[in-house]
Image (cartoon, rainbow, N blue to C red):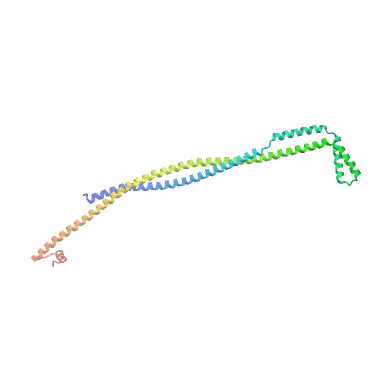
């Protein structure tokens, strides 16, 4: 069996080998903690970016849906401007032809017709004057026919032009809405692409941090396992050293007891012979009750 000195030397060697393993394990555990924190933060950022991209995509799709609805509305309410232009051109031609035919006499006749018509409606007249005015009006009707047709055509032309302007304003308003929605949709689409691009970068960094976490954990576990093996061996060696010390003390005690036994026998013989005893011999015999 190895001596205590040999076991102490071996114990020192084991402790010297175990210490670097403990330091490596502690360093790796620290790296595990740091990489786990980094990975978790990156994963949280990735979740935020994913939700942001999903919101941007949903907003974009909603805007695109609104654009399609507006386009359908625009198509369903689209005015046939070519037909309106044809009507306008036709009326203008008719007006031009009628205006060429109309004379100053017809214009004066219309003015006279309006005056007589107003007089008939507002001035008090007898039956004879009323009949005369009615005859004059009937006589003027034929003369103002072209003038009334011109007024009618002008009114139609004004109505057509007003409708064209109204429809153009309506179409421009719808177009403006479509343009604004399309711009907002494009902004959300670009934002979504940027979020997805950043998401890919963050996920890649998170994967790298997770791999570092796994590698560090593996090294920490391996160094911890090796360190524990050394600790087990150290504990066993300490137990053996303690047992050696205990055995050594027991041997020493046993030798002392044996020596005292021999001394006691010799002192007893001296006492029987009447020889002089030393103080220690006398004390030993007293302790044993031999005196």
Q: Quadrant of residue 189?
A: top right
Q: Residue furthest left?
A: 273
- Residue at the location (86% across, 46% down)? 122
- Residue at the location (18% across, 58% down)? 254
Q: Which percent across, then down, holds residue 256? A: 17, 59
Q: Which percent across, then down, holds residue 16? A: 30, 48
Nearer-the-camera pick, 290 or 94: 94
Q: Residue furthest right?
A: 128
- Residue at the location (34% across, 46% down)? 223
Nearer-the-camera pick, 195 or 25: 195
Q: How many marks?
A: 0
Residue 237 is left or right of residue 62, and the answer is left
Q: Which percent across, then down, holds residue 136? A: 88, 39
Nearer-the-camera pick, 150 or 236: 150
Q: Which percent across, then down, holds residue 235? A: 28, 51
Quadrant where the C terminus is found in the figure: bottom left
Q: Residue furthest bottom?
A: 291
Q: Quadrant of residue 269?
A: bottom left
Residue 211 is left or right of residue 60, and the answer is left
Q: Quadrant of residue 113?
A: top right
Nearer-the-camera pick, 27 or 283: 27
Residue 90 is left or right of residue 55, and the answer is right
Up/down of 115 relative to 97, above or below:
below
Up/down of 82 relative to 280, above or below:
above
């Amino acid at each position: 069996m190895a001596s205590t000195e040999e076991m102490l030397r071996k114990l020192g060697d084991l402790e010297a080998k175990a210490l670097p393993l403990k330091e490596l394990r502690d360093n790796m555990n620290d790296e595990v903690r740091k990489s786990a924190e980094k990975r978790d933060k990156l994963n949280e950022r990735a979740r935020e970016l994913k939700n942001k991209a999903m919101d941007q995509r949903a907003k974009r799709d909603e805007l695109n849906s609104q654009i399609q609805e507006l386009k359908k509305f625009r198509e369903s309410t689209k005015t046939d401007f070519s037909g309106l232009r044809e009507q306008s051109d036709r009326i203008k031609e008719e007006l031009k032809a009628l205006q060429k035919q109309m004379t100053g006499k017809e214009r004066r006749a219309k003015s006279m017709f309006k005056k007589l018509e107003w007089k008939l409606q507002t001035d008090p007249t007898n039956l004879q004057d009323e009949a005369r005015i009615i005859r004059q009006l009937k006589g003027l009707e034929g003369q103002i026919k072209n003038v009334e047709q011109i007024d009618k055509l002008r009114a139609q032309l004004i109505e057509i032009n007003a409708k064209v302007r109204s429809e153009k304003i309506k179409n421009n308003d719808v177009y403006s809405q479509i343009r604004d929605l399309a711009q907002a949709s494009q902004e959300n689409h670009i934002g979504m692409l940027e979020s997805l691009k950043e998401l890919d970068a963050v996920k890649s960094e998170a994967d790298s941090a997770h791999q570092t976490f796994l590698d560090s954990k593996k090294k920490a576990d391996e160094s911890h396992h090796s360190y524990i093996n050394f600790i087990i061996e150290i504990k066993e060696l300490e137990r053996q050293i303690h047992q050696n010390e205990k055995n050594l003390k027991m041997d020493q005690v046993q030798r002392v007891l044996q020596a005292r036994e021999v001394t006691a026998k010799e002192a007893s013989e001296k006492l029987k012979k009447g020889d002089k005893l030393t103080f220690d011999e006398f004390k030993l015999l007293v302790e044993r009750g031999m005196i």
